[in-house]
Amino acid sequence: MGSIVLKSLSVLLGIFFIFVGTMKMSSLISKELHKDLRKEYVKYAKVFPLSDTLDFKVPSKWYRRVVGSLEIICGLAMALIPYAKVKQVANVVLIFLMLVAVYSHYMVNDKFERIAPALSRP
């Protein structure tokens, strides 16, 4: 029984990340939300954690695309690939992305309502 629940949860979480990543990559799902995400990523790119250390400014367009692509790839891995090692790698990548998201939200002084979704993911 537990195996079915874990598999179902993995598939649903994978679909969720595919959905979120797709919103960041294109306006297929919602033009308004995609436009808002593009505007927000301009702020997040300015506070990217390693930009000061590496003396490198991250273009917001590529930052958003890389995050969206990683969410889609990891979501596909969680939803479709049955190997536990692959799912663990996808989980680690997603946890790292969510930590960077929480940091970015905090650094641009976003309200808790904007930070909460990043806190509630894996």
Image: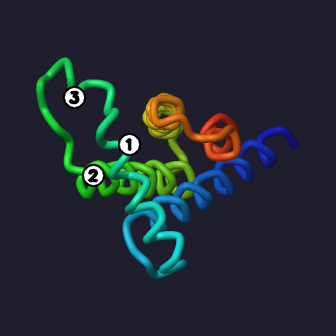
Label 3 SS: helix
> How many discs mark residues in the rendered view?
3
Q: Which residue is mark 3?
A: 51
Q: Earlier in the sequence, mark 3 or mark 1?
A: 1
| Amino acid on which disc 2 is placed | Ser
Alpha carbons under labels 3 and 1: distance apart? 11 Å
Q: CA distance from mark 2 to mark 3?
A: 12 Å
Q: Position of residue 44 (x, y in %)?
A: 38, 42
- Could you say whether the residue bearing mark 1 is in a helix, strand or loop? helix
Alpha carbons under labels 2 and 1: distance apart: 7 Å
| Mark toward the start of the polypeptide (2 vs 1) | 1
Apparent side of residue 5 relative to residue 22 in the rendered image (left or right): right
Residue marked by disc 1: 44
Q: Quadrant of residue 72?
A: bottom left
Q: Is residue 29 left or right of residue 55?
A: right
Q: Which residue is mark 2?
A: 60
Circle 3 packing at 10 Å, graded few (<14), some (14-19), many (20+), is: few
Of residue 108 and residue 88, the one placed in the foreground of this image is 108
